[in-house]
Image: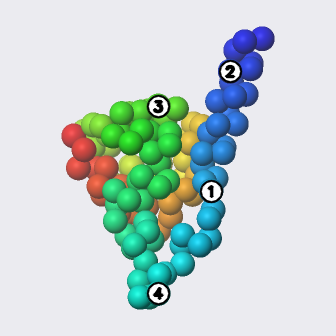
């Protein structure tokens, strides 16, 4: 019974973390017309906004596995495939296109 409750709690936490807050006001450019959120393309900021809730602020892992040395195990293409298609409990499509490529390239350097 405890295992089922823990699995339900972890699954719910993962889904809620993956969905994010969706505060639309954050995504709109400021008065100056440019945005400083993850949409600007900074790989570390994208990771922080979309991945760190499961993989940790410092890539140390948590609900998801550690990514501290992921570049020693997978190349950029392999990492990008997991980001876009998902794997195990990780949902597909949290990042797509250029954002997925930038984060994959950044993570591939972690060896």
Which residue was labeled with disc 2?
6
Residue receiving disc 1: 21
Q: Quadrant of the N terminus?
A: top right
For the residues labelled 1 and 4, the Cα–Cα distance comes to 23 Å
Q: Nearer the viewer, mark 4 or mark 2?
A: 4
Q: Earlier in the sequence, mark 1 or mark 4?
A: 1
Quarter residue 55 falls in: top left
Residue 69 position, x and y percent, is 27, 37
The numbered dot on residue 62 is: 3
Front-most of residues 95 and 27: 27
Residue 105 lies in quadrant: bottom left
- Closer to the chain start, of discs 2 and 3, is 2
Q: CA distance from mark 2 to mark 3?
A: 15 Å
Q: Identify the element where label 2 is drawn.
A: helix
User: Disc 1 or 3, which lies upstream in sequence?
Assistant: 1
Local crowd size for mark 3, using a 10 Å CA cut-off: few (<14), some (14–19), many (≥20): few
Q: Position of residue 8 (x, y in %)?
A: 73, 28
In this rendering, would 10 be left or right of 70?
A: right
- Viewer-side label of 1, 3: 1
Q: Nearer the viewer, mark 2 or mark 1?
A: 1
CA gap between label 1 and label 3 equals 20 Å
Callout 2 touching callout 3 (CB < 8 Å) = no
Q: Position of residue 68 (x, y in %)?
A: 30, 37
* Residue at 72% from the left image edge and 12% from the top image edge: 2
């Amino acid at each position: 019974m405890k295992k089922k409750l823990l699995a339900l709690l972890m699954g719910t936490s993962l889904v809620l973390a993956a969905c994010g807050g969706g505060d639309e006001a954050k995504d709109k450019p400021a008065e100056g017309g440019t945005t400083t959120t993850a949409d600007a393309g900074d790989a570390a900021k994208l990771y922080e906004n979309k991945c760190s809730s499961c993989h940790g602020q410092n890539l140390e892992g948590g609900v998801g596995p550690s990514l501290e040395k992921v570049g020693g195990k997978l190349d950029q293409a392999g990492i990008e495939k997991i980001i876009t298609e998902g794997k195990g409990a990780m949902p597909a499509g949290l990042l797509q296109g250029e954002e997925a490529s930038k984060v994959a390239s950044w993570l591939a350097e972690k060896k």
